[in-house]
Image: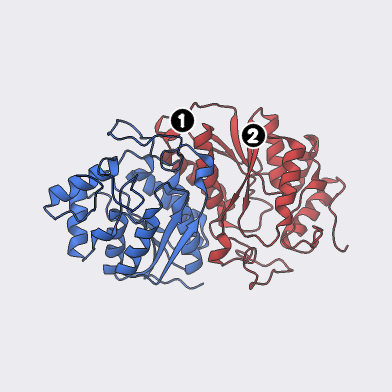
Chain colours: A red, B blue
Amino acid sequence: MSLNSKKAVVLVSGGLDSATVLAIARQAGHECYALSFDYGQRHRSELLAAAKVVEHLGAIAHRTFVLDLAQFGGSALTDSSIALPRQHAEGIPVTYVPARNTVFLSIALAWAEVLGAYDIFIGVNAIDYSGYPDCRPEYIEAYQRMATLATKTGVEGQLIQISTPLLHLSKAEIIRRGTDLGVNYGLTLSCYDPSEQGLACGQCDSCRLRREGFSVSGIADPTKYVSH
Amino acid sequence: MSLNSKKAVVLVSGGLDSATVLAIARQAGHECYALSFDYGQRHRSELLAAAKVVEHLGAIAHRTFVLDLAQFGGSALTDSSIALPRQHAEGIPVTYVPARNTVFLSIALAWAEVLGAYDIFIGVNAIDYSGYPDCRPEYIEAYQRMATLATKTGVEGQLIQISTPLLHLSKAEIIRRGTDLGVNYGLTLSCYDPSEQGLACGQCDSCRLRREGFSVSGIADPTKYVSH
C-alpha cells in the first residue's frame, strides 16, 4: 500500500454541499474517490442525484456503500413512523440520524486506508446547519485525532486529514463558491421529502436553508420545487 | 429516548475475548444488546459461534449488522487474494482489516444512541494482541472523546463510555476470568482459518495466542483443532 498525497475520499450525498466539496477537492488537485451511502434513507432520489453529480464533476471511482442504519430507527430520515417536520424547531431535530457522520467517516476511513489516501472530504457546516452535534468543529477535530490513532497510516506517522472546506461558510457563500467552480446545482437534491419524481418539497428545513442561500447569494435557484 | 444507565451495547464476534466481555457486562448488571458483524469475513463460522455465545450467556437482543467491508479489500481476513500467514511476523499483520474497530464502534454508537444506552463494551486487548493500531488504549480514549462530541447523548451532558475490561489482561487472565464467570469457551471460535466444519487450524496467530493462553492459565483447552 503506497501513500499518495493526491488521493482523497470525498463523501457525496447528492446534495448541494457535498457537490461543492467535490468541486473544491478536484480544484485542489486531488484524485477523488467519491463515496455515497445507501443507508435506508427515505429520500432515495438523493442517490440518483449523487450519481449525476459525480458524473458531472468527475472522480476516479464512485462507490455506493450499502448499510441498513434504518434497522435501528430513531430518525425521521430513516423511520417512516416519525413524521417529518414542516417547520423549523429549536434543538436537535428529528431528522438527526444517530451517529451518521461517525459511521460515514469510519467507512470512508476504511476505504482511504486501503487506497493509501490520507485525505477525507466531508461537507459539514457549522453555520447554516440543522443543529446536528456531528457537524461541529470540535467533533471533526476529535474525529481526526481518533482516525490518526486508528490506522496503519497513522502509526506510520501520517496524519489523517478530515477536510471540511465548508465548515465556516454560509449557505450563500457555498453557492457562490460552487458556482465559480462550475457546479450545476440543478443536478443536486437537498430536500428531506422529495416527490416520487425527485422534486423538492420547498418546505422542509433543508429546502428552507437552500432557498435562503440562493436568495442571499443573488444566484438564480435552479431547484425544481413541487409548489412555489 | 430515555437514558438508562443499565443498557449496554456489547460487541460479540464469536471469539474468546468478546464472550468474556459479554459475561463481564452481564455480571456488572447491564441489560446487554449484543451486536455482531457480517462484514465479508472469510471465516463465517464465527457468526455461528457468536449466536451460540449470546444464547449461552444471555442478552436482551442480538443483531447481526451486514456491511461489505470486503469490497474495499486490503486484508487477508476479507480478501481471498491475500494469503493467511502461518507464522507470526513483526509489525501490523496482513490480517488487519482497515479501520475495522472504528467502523464497528461507530455502528454500535448508532444503536446505543437509539437505545438510550451510553455504555459500549468491546473486547480489545493491549497485551496479547496482534499488533492492530485500533486495539491501543490511546485509540480507545480518543474514540470515547469523539463519540461523546458526536452524539445527542453527549450534547445532553452524558459521556459515552467505551468499556474495555480486557485491555490490560493477558490471554491467560482473560480465560481465568471468563471461566470464573461460567463462560463455556467450547462455544467460541478464535481461528482465522477454520475448516468447513468450524474446527480451528491451530496454527494462525489467533490460534497460537489462544493455545498459549489456555496453557498458561492451567485450564483445559476445549477447542477442537483440525490437527494437534
Amino acid at circle 2: Cys
Q: Are marks 2 and 1 on the same chain?
A: yes
Chain at tag 1 = A
Q: Which residue is mark 2?
A: A32
Amino acid at circle 1: Gln
What residue appears at the point 37 percent right and 54 percent down from the top-left corner?
B46
Residue B108 placement: quadrant: bottom left
Residue A178 placement: quadrant: top right
In this view, the residue in front, A194 or A138, is A194
Chain at tag 2 = A
What residue appears at the point 44 percent right and 55 percent down from the top-left corner?
B37
Which one is closest to the eye, mark 2 or mark 1?
2
SS at badge 1: loop
Task: Assess disc 2: are there few (<14), some (14-19) or many (≥20) residues with their C-alpha within 10 Å of its C-alpha.
Answer: many
Q: Marks 2 and 1, Cα distance to the nearest angstrom?
A: 19 Å
What residue appears at the point 56 percent right and 27 percent down from the top-left corner?
A5
Q: Which residue is mark 1?
A: A158
Decide if residue A58 is on the left or right side of residue B80.
right
Decide if residue B221 is on the left or right side of residue B155.
left
**Residue A206: percent from left, percent from top:** 72, 58
Precedes in sequence: disc 2 or disc 1? 2
Task: Assess disc 1: are there few (<14), some (14-19) or many (≥20) residues with their C-alpha within 10 Å of its C-alpha.
Answer: few
Decide if residue A222 is on the left or right side of residue B45.
right
What residue appears at the point 29 percent right and 57 percent down from the top-left corner?
B188
